[in-house]
Amino acid sequence: MKQWISQVAQNRGSKGGSAKCPVGLFKSKVKDSVVPLCEEHFPDDKAKNEWVVLFYNQKENADMKDFGNRLANDFGNDPPDMSKALKKPKKKRERLESLAEKYDVKVNLPSKGPFGMDALAKVGGVCCDCGEEAAAFCSTSLRQGEEDLKTPQAFWVAKGQRTLLKDVEFTAPQLFGRTVEKLGFSAQAKSEL
């Protein structure tokens, strides 16, 4: 009984899937908005959200903590145990418009929508140097054909399909721009068609 209670307390604020994964840089359930991911807990074809997944080494990419949290917060993700009084819900359309202005990214939104108050995309982090299982998962995930990619890398995950975000700098404006493109709201993508 005591073990069950402590497990429930540990998983508070979450459905518990990410509890299977090493937390890496994102240790705080009150401050960190990035969801720890691993092979056992990774977005699949049943996931209701699109994801930006950051693969990193905590020893080499210590700056990933601030960057990942900033990106997650910008996209509308909150830490699982954050006080509800501190959460600031925002409509998706307003969020896209304000981030487009903030990062000087051109967006092409429909006359109405997108609707809802959900996050634009979830942000997850895979710690590649947090044990043997994590290293093995990263090794297979970061292998593209004959090439072994180095961390950090970012993937777009939608309906279980992983797409490497190639040639993107690890800056909020660059990753926001690629996310807008993947969501289908990029002004550049529309004009190129």
Image (spheres, rainbow, N blue to C red):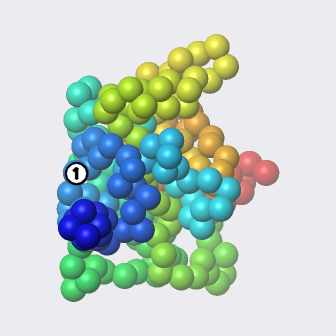
Residue occupying the point 38% across, 26% down:
132
Horizontal arrangement in the rendering, residue 36 relative to residue 190 (left or right): left
Residue occupying the point 45% across, 43% down:
38
With respect to residue 179, does 127 lie above or below? Answer: above
> Which of the two residues, 54 or 170, is positioned nearer the viewer here?
54
Residue occupying the point 38% across, 46% down:
21
Q: Residue type at mark 1: give it.
A: Lys
Rendered-image quadrant of the N terminus: bottom left
Residue occupying the point 26% across, 49% down:
26
Residue 10 in picture, x, y percent from top left: 25, 63
Residue 189 in picture, x, y percent from top left: 68, 52
Horizontal arrangement in the rendering, residue 65 relative to residue 110 (left or right): left
Q: To which residue does mark 1 refer?
A: 27
Residue 46, picture quadrant: bottom right
Residue 128, picture quadrant: top left
Answer yes or no: is residue 11 visible. Answer: yes
